[in-house]
Amino acid sequence: MPELPEVETTRLILCKILIEEKIRLVKVINNKLRYEIPKNFSIKTKNKTIKKITRRGKFLIFNLSQNISFISHLGMTGVFRIEKKYQKQKHDHVTFFLNNSVITYNDVRKFGFFKLENQDKINESKHLRSLGIEPLNKEFNANSLEKFLHQKSQNIKSFLMNQKYIAGLGNIYCSESLFEAGVSPLRSCKKISHSEIKNIVIAIKKVLRRSVTKGGTSLQNFEDPHGNIGYFSNYLKVYNRSGKSCYRCKKNVKISKLVIQGRSTFYCQQCQK
């Protein structure tokens, strides 16, 4: 599933092309995604100008003229494709015809969605209102994280995966950040020291920013709107590396794999304490 860096990569590219572009026509090819696309989606968005595209966690928010907005989520396999002229592909679901380009949403597994929202009340949407802090914001720091952590007895990996505490983190970047910080994913939140919490915050920001610069991580389906894969997969230090040598401990220690809350977790038992 695309996580914060993949969604941010998508947003940055769309912003360069779509801002101040008018939507001439919207063609809903298949409205049965995770949620059924509203019947008035095409009418509401037609002839509106795209004023701003923002991100909240793993959600994209398109702000249009006349106080219209819509939220988009990429689900597990969703991608936007930019073309000069529409070229039909299997699993295309929504196509936006603009003045100078065509943007198509393609989703093999159909877990993504589009939801119309009132721009003034966008943060009250059920998809956004319960999201936690943005990890790349200044407000996300050791002090703010510690307030939450020391109230929890669950393991740190489960905490970081919970979107109501930190928005946008997923399985890949939780594993990578905890390795970077040298903290075991099994550690109880209550038992993590302030200095370790500071290291976790620094690691999360470092890993996320590095991934955005590499275009995100492409392990299966993710491509940016230009059709390019994300190259951060070449820089993963623990994720999907079970049985391989730890980059920090070298040849003597292998990366371990375990399952936490149904998700594969990768870490080094020696250097992550």
Image (cartoon, grey):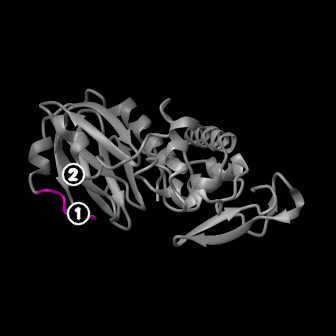
Q: Which residue is found at the position 14% from the left and 50% from the top? A: 41
Span shown in magenta: 34-38
Q: Residue at x 31, y 45 (%)?
A: 103
Look at 42% across and 62% down and name the residue there.
76
Secondary-structure class at tag 2: strand
Q: Which residue is mark 1?
A: 35
Residue 27: give x, y in percent of width and height.
18, 52
- Furthest toward the right, the residue is 252
Left or right of 145? Residue 184 is right
| Residue type at the position of mark 1 | Tyr
Q: Tell me whether the residue at label 2 lies in contact with that at label 1, contact meaning CB atoms closer than 8 angstroms.
A: yes
From the top left corner, tell me how far across and down residue 1 is, in percent. Answer: 46, 59
Indicate the amino acid at tag 2. Lys
Q: Nearer the viewer, residue 92 or 48?
A: 48
Tell me if residue 85 can be seen: no
Determine whether, in the image, residue 87 is placed left or right of residue 13.
left
- Majority secondary structure in the magenta region: loop
- Quadrant of the rendered image containing residue 242: bottom right
